[in-house]
Image (spheres, rainbow, N blue to C red):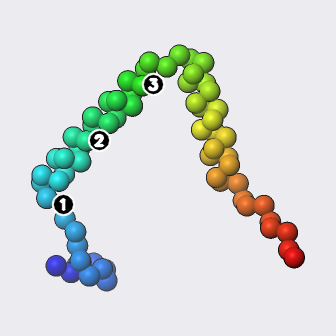
Amino acid sequence: MTHPEDRRFVVVVPAEHGKHEVRTTLRDMHGRMVAVVNDMSTSERDVVATFLRRMIDGVTQPAEPTPGP
């Protein structure tokens, strides 16, 4: 079926089973992630937060110019 509002050739619509499977998988994964964080000490959380802030800075800063030949 062509998309009614733009030039995409096909509209992909997930099946109910697929939507349910994705929701279940993400819910379970989120629960495991929360459990990991809850098991961390405050100092461990601080280390992770510092690491993540530094990684964000590292990927959002403009690239250094490459020296020419």
Q: Give the image location of residue 65, x and y in percent.
A: 80, 66
Q: Give the image location of residue 68, x and y in percent.
A: 85, 74
Instruction: Determine whether the residue tagged by mark 2 lies in a helix, strand or loop.
Output: helix
Label 1–label 3 contact, CB within 8 A: no
Instruction: Tell me: residue 31, above or below residue 2.
Output: above
Q: Is residue 36 left or right of residue 45?
A: left
Query: Residue shown at 63%/44% (left/top)?
Result: 55
Q: Is residue 66 left or right of residue 10?
A: right
Image quarter where the N terminus lies is bottom left
Considering only order in the chain, which callout, 3 or 2, is on the residue closer to the N terminus? Answer: 2
* Three-letter code for the amino acid on which mark 2 is drawn: Leu
Query: Residue shown at 23%/73% (left/top)?
Result: 11
Considering only order in the chain, which callout, 1 or 2, is on the residue closer to the N terminus? Answer: 1
Query: Residue shown at 42%/25% (left/top)?
Result: 36
Considering only order in the chain, which callout, 3 or 1, is on the residue closer to the N terminus? Answer: 1
**Inter-mark Cα distance, 1 to 3:** 32 Å
Crowdedness of circle 3 by 10 Å Cα count: few (<14), some, many (20+)? Answer: few
* Three-letter code for the amino acid on which mark 1 is drawn: Pro
* Three-letter code for the amino acid on which mark 3 is drawn: Val
When asked about the image quadrant of residue 9, the answer is bottom left
Query: Residue shown at 56%/17% (left/top)?
Result: 42
Nearest the camera: 9 or 3? 9
Mark 1 — residue? 14
Instruction: Determine whether the residue tagged by mark 1 lies in a helix, strand or loop.
Output: loop
Label 2–label 3 contact, CB within 8 A: no
What numbered label is drawn on residue 37?
3
Instruction: Determine whether the residue tagged by mark 3 lies in a helix, strand or loop.
Output: helix
**Inter-mark Cα distance, 2 to 1:** 16 Å
Mark 2 — residue? 26
**Inter-mark Cα distance, 2 to 3:** 16 Å
Instruction: Tell me: residue 56, above or below residue 29.
Output: below
